[in-house]
């Protein structure tokens, strides 16, 4: 009985740790899929309406790079915009499910979605490079001209 109890405790601890990491690291990645019309959801009801669009952001000396996993899309179904210091990614993942199929697992979300990612610096959207390959959207944004350092006076 003790080995079974240890196995259950270990499994519960692992599950708890996974949820904790998901909530702390991926809160922004949890994305709603549905209809553009307010209050209306056009995704099939038996499929999830939420999915993770995992992202990573880093910077080089001259640019900010954002990569987002968005599998199962065509590049024409994606829209990418810079709004102030936020990258907005939207699109519509067309539903592939049909009534003739007998599903055993339903984890993919379909419908319209939007994800907003804060940018660490001001960027020049005119110099953006955007590509979508192998289910990964990559956006390279040139940093806008940084302000020169300003020396502050210290009062004594």
Image (cartoon, rainbow, N blue to C red):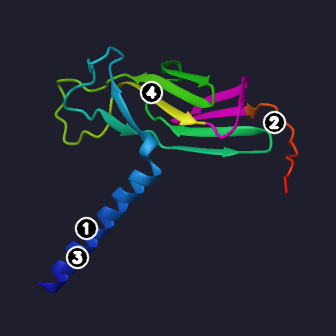
- Residue 117: image quadrant is top right
**In magenta stretch: residue 123:** yes
What is the C-alpha distance between the residues marked 4 and 2? Answer: 29 Å
Q: Are marks 1 and 3 in contact (CB under 8 Å)?
A: no
Q: Quadrant of residue 109?
A: top left
Tell me, yes or no, whether the two marked residues, 4 and 2, touch with CB atoms within 8 Å. Answer: no
Quarter containing the C terminus: bottom right
Indicate the secondary structure of the residue bearing disc 2: loop
Work out whether mark 4 precedes mark 1 in sequence or the reverse, and give the earlier one. 1
Disc 3 to disc 4: CB gap under 8 Å: no
Residue bearing the label numbered 3: 7
Q: Secondary structure at mark 4?
A: strand
Residue 148, above or below 2: above
Percent position of residue 26, x then y: 44, 48
Q: CA distance from mark 1 to mark 3?
A: 9 Å
Q: Which residue is mark 2?
A: 146
Indicate which label's residue lies in the foreground, 3 or 4: 4
Q: Residues within 10 Å of mark 1 (few under 14, many from 20)?
A: few
**Quadrant in the rendering for residue 20:** bottom left
Q: Please tell me which residue is depicted at 69% across the width and 34% down the height of the picture.
A: 140
Cβ atoms at labels 2 and 1 below 8 Å apart:
no
Main secondary structure along the magenta-highlighted residues? strand
Q: Are marks 2 and 3 in contact (CB under 8 Å)?
A: no
Segment colored magenta:
119-141
Q: Quadrant of the N terminus?
A: bottom left
Residue 27 highlighted magenta (yes or no): no
Disc 4 residue crowd, few under 14, some 14–19, many 20+, Cα 10 Å: some
Q: Which residue is mark 4?
A: 114
């Amino acid at each position: 009985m003790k080995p079974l109890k240890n196995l259950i405790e270990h499994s519960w601890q692992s599950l708890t740790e996974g949820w904790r990491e998901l909530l702390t690291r991926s809160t922004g990645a949890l994305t709603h899929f549905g209809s553009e019309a307010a209050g209306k959801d056009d995704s099939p009801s038996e499929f999830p309406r939420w999915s993770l669009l995992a992202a990573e952001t880093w910077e080089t000396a001259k640019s900010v790079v954002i990569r987002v996993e968005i599998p199962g899309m065509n590049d024409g179904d994606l829209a990418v915009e810079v709004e102030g210091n936020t990258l907005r990614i939207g699109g519509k993942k067309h539903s592939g499910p049909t009534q003739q199929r007998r599903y055993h697992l339903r984890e993919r979300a379909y419908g319209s979605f939007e994800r907003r990612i804060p940018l660490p610096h001001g960027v020049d959207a005119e110099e953006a490079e955007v590509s979508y390959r192998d289910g990964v959207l990559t956006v390279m944004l040139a940093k806008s001209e940084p302000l020169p350092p300003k020396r502050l006076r210290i009062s004594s």
